[in-house]
Amino acid sequence: MPCHWRGPIRGGQPQALLGFRLCNTGAAGEHKVAGDESPFTQPVVPLAYDLPLEDWSQSALSICVVGASGDLAKKKIFPALFALYYDNHLPKHFTIFGYARTKLDDAKFREMIAGNLSCRLSDAGDCGAKMEEFLSRCHYQAGQYDSLEDYGALDKRMCAAEKRFKRGDRVFYLSIPPNIFTTVAASASSAASSKSGWTRMIVEKPFGRDLESSRQLATELYKHLTEEQIYRIDHYLGKELIENLTVLRFANLVFEPLWSRQYIRNVQVIFSENFGTEGRGGYFDQYGIVRDVIQNHLLQILALFAMEQPASMGAEDIRDEKVKVLRSMQTVRLEDMVLGQYRGRRVKGMSQPGYLEDPTVPPNSLTPTFAACAVFLNNARWDGVPFLLKAGKALEGRMAEIRVQFRHVPGSLYRDKLGFSAGMSSESATNELVIRIQPNESIYLKINNKVPGLGLRVENTRLDLTYGSRYQTHLPDAYERLILDCVNGDRRLFIRNDELEVAWEKFTPVLQEIEERRVQPEQYPYGSRGPVGAHYLAAKYGVRWGDHNSDDL
């Protein structure tokens, strides 16, 4: 099976976890006809996104995590940085700084983050040594988020780490509440920007609550940073199966002719969590599931799925196509949306508290913990195809996936062979492409196939590519990929401001209507499949939720 690497290479060897390796998964020894040679057997031409790592021999890199004592930093960002270091993806001369208001020295800081670090291989003999080496490069600066003096002290420590080199580049990861984004951006850019290299800032969602607040945030950030310096992160775009979307579609001729309203009946983008807010509802209650998940994660996935082929794999070409898709989308209507809120229940003597029982949530809150909506794209490829987006907390399982349901075979010869009398419906016999983002990453195509044996009986079965069994390697965490992309200046998986504006334009009217009319969310039990209204919404457009099929749970 020929595989060709698309990604960073050091010392003549491909870096094994991050980057692109395009693989032809055809059978070994297959016969090839002249003129039918696979493009993967040809010499590899560097793609636009194969950004060569900069020459770091005369450069230093400083990565500062602002909000270093918070949960996101401790559980995701520092482990991702260690994983990059462990796999030799970070440049040789790097230093990590934590910045927060908590009073810590370097030793206490290292102790705080060490508990969440781990090596990919349990039997890795060099794990302990690597961890000590990594921690020795981690330093802490206590300070107020609005203090130029404190950022000045941070700048002095960064300069000390960079003084032996011609250039010092800096990444600031803002792992902080959204209400202080602009304060930190102003102070850090003023007092701690690099004087000899570039400065970049990674900004976590939410990027506002609506179109107006998003524009205000952008205006304030632009006072201190250029668009090229701002890396708006949506960690879902860093997941392996999301990055594979463009490869699946544009590197496989078999899919492109089918990727339209002519063959696709509907597309479902589904996100579910099997836990609630559980004491952390104060933040969530300010935003709700639509702002927290649908308007960003799911809409970004939709844009990548539905976009036209970009002129290149360069960041601007990809993001141009995503913006075109979002602009073609109809503004979301309340009649095409269902809202829900989970209530508590007892299971086997154990209590599962409802959303309103969370002590951090107002007792009369109408904030939805579940939402489903149907959206439509007004363009030639997708006109009339419903895209159903669904997200919820406290559901029966944890899952994120894309489901592409194809149209039925017209005048099927095998309709009477599909065993409808045995409980199989025409819906069960549909062709469906499923891209499972998490957990158990996989891609599978549901087809109708003859059951072996005498006679003719047809059943729906899978052509299955499960990553865990097919690829004997650990999939990198989304934060690893995105942090490395920022270091390398690769912006493909980060959100541009015009993308953000269009996304808010499509959702702000319905969000305002929900709040003005004080729409009551439909109650659903903790651990269930969600509110009944979601099924009625799907049925309105002749759709059945694919994640409720018993063979897919």
Image (cartoon, rainbow, N blue to C red):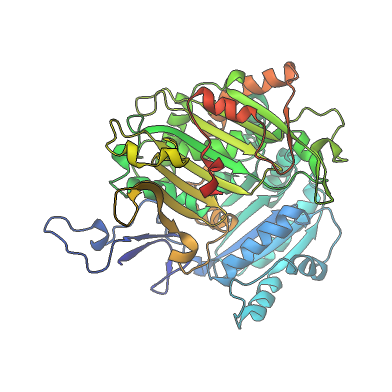
The part of the image, by quadrant, that contains residue 425 is top left
Q: Residue 308, percent across and down?
A: 36, 36
Q: Residue at image x 11%, y 58%? A: 34
- Nearer to me, 189 or 261: 261
Of 525 and 6, the residue lying toward us: 525
Q: Position of residue 219 (x, y in %)?
A: 64, 30
Relative placement, left or right, of 312 versus 282 is left
Hey, which residue is sitting farthest top in the picture? 517
Please identify the quarter of the rendering in which residue 291 is found: top right
Question: Seen from this angle, which residue lies furthest left?
Answer: 34
How many marks do you count on the picture? 0
Task: Name which residue lies at 35% across and 44% down.
Answer: 312
Q: Does residue 332 appear left or right of residue 416 in this picture?
A: right
| Image position of 206 (left or right of 43) | right
**Along the line of sight, the residue nearer the viewer: 290 or 479:** 290
Compared with 454, 332 (above or below) is above
In the rendered image, residue 174, in percent from the top left (x then y), is placed at: 69, 48
Asked whether the viewer can see residue 490, the reply is no
Where is residue 190 shown, x and y percent of the image? 69, 45
Which residue is farthest bottom?
Answer: 125
Query: Residue drawn at (13%, 59%), measured in percent from left and top?
Result: 33
Q: Nearer the viewer, residue 518 or 444?
A: 444
In this view, 161 is above or below 299:
below
Q: Residue at x 46, y 46 (%)?
A: 434
Residue 267 visible somewhere in the drawing: yes
In which quadrant of the rendered image does the N terminus lie?
bottom left
